[in-house]
């Protein structure tokens, strides 16, 4: 097989139009971000007078001020805490539930599965006020737990269904032989199911991470203290409507975008695997 | 997860116990007050606040303050959720009027009258002591009159174009071609958030066309919003749009972008509120700022009230009704400081005219503020609509409707009819016993 | 040997923790919301039962109709825009029609990693009258008054938002399709080529059938996301100007939090959920029919 077969056999006109479309898309995607990036290196006056030009004397001044004024260091720390704890919890809970629903022949399996599916159609806002009232009664407002629990709850339906599809594919025979060997179910879960489920664990972890990191509403409503704010909340409040310093706004937006971009660049092959595995199961 | 909960509950319990114990201890023990404030520290207008807080802490080191700041409408949305739960901070931003109805109507705000001795009240502009509640309650010490309509003038540009202050709206409209030919916008104004057209423009126009006397009757129901004064006021706005007074895309411009344009010298006039002065001062170069002037909204054809503006009491921090004992004392110390002599002096230094009577000769008041003080002392004040009428009618019908009128998709008469229909059926002013 | 009761206990210990968290946080509040939708309540004070009044009001509420129309537009742009486009891009990348595929892939995926509220802020800076796009156009055309008039058009104000949604979500579907394309064994394609199949046949006979279920799942995701759509629109326009870009979720939010009409807001929430259920059911029915035929 020649190397030529690696590339498509499509006629050149196809290739040309493919290039055009690709480049067009890339430019549209990248241009606003690039513009935001270099604009954030300009002082406010320069942004106003020469919005399109490259910075005359690029400096990180905006970033330093935005970081301090907006409390973005704390926000970053909070985002990490919320996201990581919620992701780990989601993975464990959904794998456990998937194991239970896939491998145990009880009648209630149907009910639970259906109940979780319903969750896919619920919206956050439909429940946020009663949820807030409930959290106050229990005393969970202004606590990290009070934010993390709803995060998990809202992601469980999707995660469980993804995991369910995968776990169903684990051969029953493996489990049965472990049972015969006298293993308890907890041991089976940890030493058999989990290792076999690494692909789907990775899928759920990545999808959850993406969702939690960018989440806005829960943190905004359920926390009042600045010390608990996550990154999206801190940034929108800072880059919000009263602030006329464009330089500060742009810098804070870049700070908001950067973590996930880095995450994607570093983890993108895992991401690809995740989407491949996850999406094929129904 | 469950043991985490237990630890948390135990910790909470311990904290509460310790807290209770601490309050019973000597009165020298530090008292902590929680403050939920509508404020944006990045806004140049807020520059005075950290200075005020620091001054207070110097005088009362034993009173600790914990702040949470939220700006804009999000403040209200979050606060409602807090109010719904019954758990609100010790001090919080409160408006006198419909805007803070969700907290006032719940009876969660302390009536300050027991603290307001006559000698105390005499130090302030008497206008702020109008009753704020149904039984005459006073909830806030308003630090400034929120005058909602001022026309700021860039006299430098004006002179360059050979123009002078317009006395009537028609005169201002006549200036448009010359201004636009020079590549400038006549009247900078931003209405993306929808409330500006109603608060900063419609309110003053309604006052000019009907006065507070008509508005009082409209609130009761003996006059209707389909009456001539209201419809004519809306029609004036349409006239202004058609005459190209505003920048193109006025309904896409955010407030800061609009006065930002003025500060950059891209507009000759600016339609904004009185509280914008300190922002202009912070953002403009001193030489530009020295050339700014403040005038009243020009006369409108058919007006029955002349030269007025619209004003409402500026918002202020209010006290949680549940505060008592040492905490209430501490809260009062804070309020009487920031709205008393010391706080007012700081406000003055930063360019805001306080309601506390200060000896102005001691201050070096800049030219714009001088004009502004002069202006508001010689104007009558009409009502600001969203301070008087219910939120849903204003936010769901009137504000978007004004945008529709400005964009030409609705007629003034139709908007008036829609608003009147809603008010008649729903507004609490019409349904008062 | 494991006895039935301890098996049952193990089963429950695996399923219940997730179920309890889910039920208490999502289901019970939902019941509360459902109940509220039959009342008139301003968040405090007496709760007044009004039966179906809120739902009846929805039928004739012009703002709700605009919101519904816009939500349907989002569904359309998602299902007929983002998904096909995502597929097209994935296909081109996978079939190596361009060099530097990896780079393109990374670039195009970026938008979905950004929080919606930040995406909104970014595009606001681009579209605003003082923003980058009008500035460029002004320099090109010399028309100093140029603004994006489309935002003020009753019928087309929603188009820029659809564009941003396209920008944001196409990448997601592209990645899902690409990942699944990569799972198709190269050998099958090679075999087909040997038998003389051209690009078109390969696509129709091999690739399309394998990806059909993926497209279906993507449609379901897209549809339920479309009806819930909130963050981006709220941050970009807040539903304005004059309700032109209103969507149901934003209307619900304003009704509840700004107008303090909890009963009506709850009714809107319930209706949103009903629409999602309906749309998903319809999709299932149509796909079944397509598979049969």
Image (cartoon, rainbow, N blue to C red):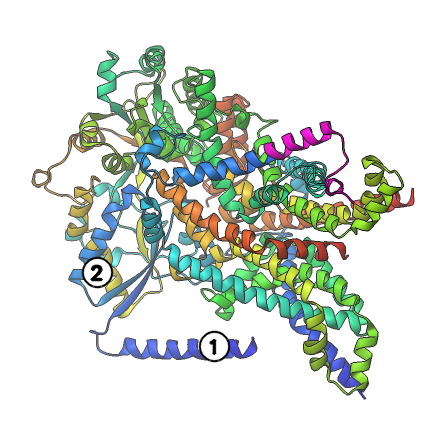
Mark found first going from the N terminus, 1 or 2: 1
The spot of residue C154 in percent (x, y) is 58, 26
In the depicted view, which residue is nearer to us: C215 or B91? C215
The residue depicted at 64 percent of the width and 49 percent of the height is C267
Chain for numbered disc 2: B
Q: Quadrant of the N terminus of chain B?
A: bottom right
Q: Residues within 10 Å of mark 1 (few under 14, many from 20)?
A: some
Is residue C26 among what the camera can see? no
Confirm whether the magenta stretch covers residue B348.
no
Report how far apart the C-alphas of labels 1 and 2 lie in the structure.
Answer: 34 Å
Residue beneath label 2, please? B333
Quadrant of the image occupied by residue C104? top right
- Name the residue tied to disc 1: B9
As drawn, C103 above or below B153: below
Where does the magenta region start and end? A1-24
Q: Measuring 42% from the left and 18% from the top, which residue is drawn there?
A: C144
């Amino acid at each position: 097989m020649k190397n030529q077969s690696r590339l498509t056999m499509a006629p050149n006109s196809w290739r040309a139009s493919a290039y055009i479309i690709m480049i067009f898309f890339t430019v549209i995607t990248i241009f606003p971000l690039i513009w935001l990036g270099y604009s954030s290196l300009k002082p406010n006056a320069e942004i106003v007078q020469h919005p399109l030009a490259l910075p005359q004397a690029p400096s990180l001044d905006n970033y330093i001020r935005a970081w301090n004024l907006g409390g973005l260091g704390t926000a970053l720390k909070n985002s990490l805490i919320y996201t990581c704890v919620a992701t780990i919890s989601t993975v464990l809970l959904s794998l456990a539930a998937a194991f239970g629903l896939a491998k145990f022949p009880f009648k209630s399996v149907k009910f639970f599965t259906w109940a979780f599916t319903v969750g896919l159609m619920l919206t956050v806002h439909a429940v946020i006020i009663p949820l807030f009232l409930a959290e106050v009664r229990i005393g969970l407002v202004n606590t990290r737990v009070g934010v993390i629990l709803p995060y998990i709850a809202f992601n469980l339906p999707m995660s469980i269904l993804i995991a369910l599809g995968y776990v169903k594919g684990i051969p029953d025979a493996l489990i049965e032989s472990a049972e015969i060997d006298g293993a308890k179910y907890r041991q089976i879960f940890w030493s058999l199911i989990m290792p076999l489920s690494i692909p789907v664990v990775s899928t759920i972890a990545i999808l959850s991470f993406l969702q939690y990191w960018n989440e806005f509403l829960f943190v905004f409503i359920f926390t009042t203290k600045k010390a608990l704010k996550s990154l999206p909340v801190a940034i929108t409040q800072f880059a919000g409507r009263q602030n006329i310093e464009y330089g500060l706004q742009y810098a804070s937006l870049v700070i908001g975008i950067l973590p996930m971009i880095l995450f994607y660049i570093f983890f993108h092959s895992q991401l690809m695997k995740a989407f491949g595995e996850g999406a094929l199961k129904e | 997860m469950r043991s985490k909960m237990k630890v948390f509950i135990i910790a909470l319990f311990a904290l509460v116990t310790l807290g209770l114990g601490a309050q019973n201890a000597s009165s020298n023990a530090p008292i902590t007050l929680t403050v939920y404030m509508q404020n944006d520290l990045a806004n140049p207008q807020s520059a005075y606040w950290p200075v005020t807080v620091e001054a207070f802490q110097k005088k009362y080191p034993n009173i600790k303050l914990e702040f949470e700041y939220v700006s804009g409408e999000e403040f209200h949305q979050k606060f409602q959720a807090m109010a719904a739960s019954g758990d609100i901070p010790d001090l919080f931003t409160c408006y006198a009027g419909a805007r803070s109805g969700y907290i006032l109507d719940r009876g969660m705000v302390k009536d300050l009258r027991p603290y307001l001795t006559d000698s105390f009240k005499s130090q302030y502009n008497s206008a702020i002591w109008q009753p704020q509640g149904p039984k005459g309650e006073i909830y806030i010490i308003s630090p400034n009159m929120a005058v909602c309509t001022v026309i700021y003038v860039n006299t430098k540009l004006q002179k360059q174009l050979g123009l002078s202050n317009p006395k009537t709206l028609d005169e201002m409209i006549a200036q448009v071609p010359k201004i636009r030919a020079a590549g400038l916008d006549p009247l900078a104004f931003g209405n993306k958030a929808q409330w500006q057209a109603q608060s900063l423009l419609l309110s003053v126009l309604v006052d000019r066309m009907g006065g507070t006397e008509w508005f009082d009757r409209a609130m009761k129901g003996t006059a209707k919003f389909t009456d001539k004064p209201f419809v004519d006021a809306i029609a004036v706005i349409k006239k202004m749009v058609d005459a190209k007074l505003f920048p193109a895309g006025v309904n896409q411009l955010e407030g800061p972008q609009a006065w930002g344009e003025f500060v950059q010298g891209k507009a000759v006039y600016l339609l904004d509120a009185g509280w914008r002065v300190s922002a202009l001062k912070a953002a403009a170069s001193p030489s530009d700022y020295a050339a700014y002037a403040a005038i009243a909204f020009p006369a409108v054809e058919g007006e029955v009230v002349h030269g007025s503006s619209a004003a409402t009491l500026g918002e202020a921090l209010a006290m949680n009704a549940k505060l008592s004992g040492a905490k209430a004392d501490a809260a009062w110390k804070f309020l009487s400081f920031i709205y008393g002599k010391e706080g007012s002096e700081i406000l003055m230094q930063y360019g805001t005219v306080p309601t506390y009577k200060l000896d102005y000769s001691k201050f070096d008041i800049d030219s714009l503020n001088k004009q502004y003080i002069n202006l508001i002392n010689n104007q009558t004040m009409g009502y600001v609509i969203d301070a008087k009428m219910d939120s849903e009618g204003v936010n769901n019908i009137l504000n978007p409707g004004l945008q529709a009128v400005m964009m030409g998709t609705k007629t003034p008469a139709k908007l008036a009819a829609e608003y009147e229909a809603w008010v008649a059926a729903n507004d609490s002013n019409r349904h008062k016993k | 040997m494991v006895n039935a009761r301890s098996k049952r206990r193990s089963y429950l210990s695996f399923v219940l923790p997730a179920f309890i968290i889910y039920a208490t946080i999502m289901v019970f509040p939902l019941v509360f919301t459902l109940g509220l939708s039959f009342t008139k309540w301003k968040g405090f004070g007496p709760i007044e039962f009004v039966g179906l009044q809120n739902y009846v009001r929805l039928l004739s509420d012009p703002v709700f109709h605009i919101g519904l129309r816009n939500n349907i537009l989002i569904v359309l742009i998602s299902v007929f825009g983002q998904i096909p486009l995502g597929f097209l891009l994935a296909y081109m990348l996978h079939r190596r029609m361009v060099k530097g595929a990896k780079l393109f892939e990374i670039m195009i995926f970026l938008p979905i990693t950004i929080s919606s509220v930040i995406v909104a802020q970014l595009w606001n800076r681009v579209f605003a009258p003082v923003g980058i796009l009008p500035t460029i156009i002004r320099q090109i055309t010399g028309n100093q008054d140029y603004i994006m008039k489309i935002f003020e058009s009753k019928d087309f104000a929603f188009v820029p938002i659809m564009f941003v949604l396209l920008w944001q979500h196409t990448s997601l579907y592209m990645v899902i399709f690409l990942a699944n394309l990569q799972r198709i064994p190269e050998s099958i394609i090679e075999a087909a080529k040997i038998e003389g199949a051209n690009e078109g046949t390969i696509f129709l006979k091999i690739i399309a059938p394998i990806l059909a279920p993926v497209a279906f799942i993507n449609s379901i995701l897209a549809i339920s996301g479309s009806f819930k759509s909130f963050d981006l629109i709220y941050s970009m326009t807040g539903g304005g100007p004059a309700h032109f870009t209103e969507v149901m979720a934003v209307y619900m939010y304003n009704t509840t939090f700004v107008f303090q009409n909890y009963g009506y807001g709850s009714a809107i929430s319930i209706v949103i959920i009903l629409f999602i259920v309906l749309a998903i059911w319809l999709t299932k029915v149509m796909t079944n029919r397509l598979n049969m035929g």
